[in-house]
Amino acid sequence: MTHILRPRSKLVDEWNYTYHYVRPHQSLGYLTPMEFLGQWVEESKHKGLVSTM
């Protein structure tokens, strides 16, 4: 059974990577979710909203 699931898992992994790291999203100002997250974390550090521990 695992030999059947392996190709699907790889496909899901590729889709997930593309969705989060490659594909820009209109609702995020045409940034990828990971780019948006990075900006949010940096801005939040300056506002004291995120711990830098």
Image (spheres, helix red, strand yellow):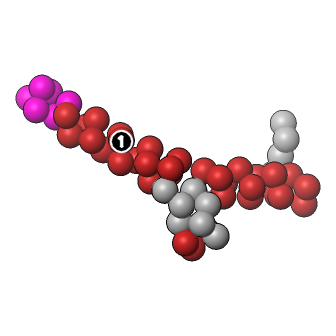
Residue 40 image point, x, y percent: 74, 58
**Nearest to the observer: residue 22 or residue 37:** 22
Q: Is residue 49 visible?
A: no
Figure check: 42 above or below 25 = above
Quadrant position of the N terminus in the picture: top left
Q: Quadrant of residue 33 in the image?
A: bottom right
Element type where label 1 sits in the image: helix
Q: Residue furthest top?
A: 3
Which residue appears at 64% of the width and 70% of the height?
A: 29
Quadrant position of the C terminus in the picture: top right
Which residue appears at 12% of the width and 26% of the height?
A: 3
Which residue appears at 86% of the width and 52% of the height?
A: 45
Residue 30 image point, x, y percent: 60, 66
Which residue appears at 60% of the width and 50% of the height?
A: 34
Residue 26 image point, x, y percent: 55, 72
**Nearest to the observer: residue 19 or residue 41:** 19
| Residue identifier under label 1 | 14
The magenta span reads 1-6
Q: Quadrant of residue 6 in the image?
A: top left
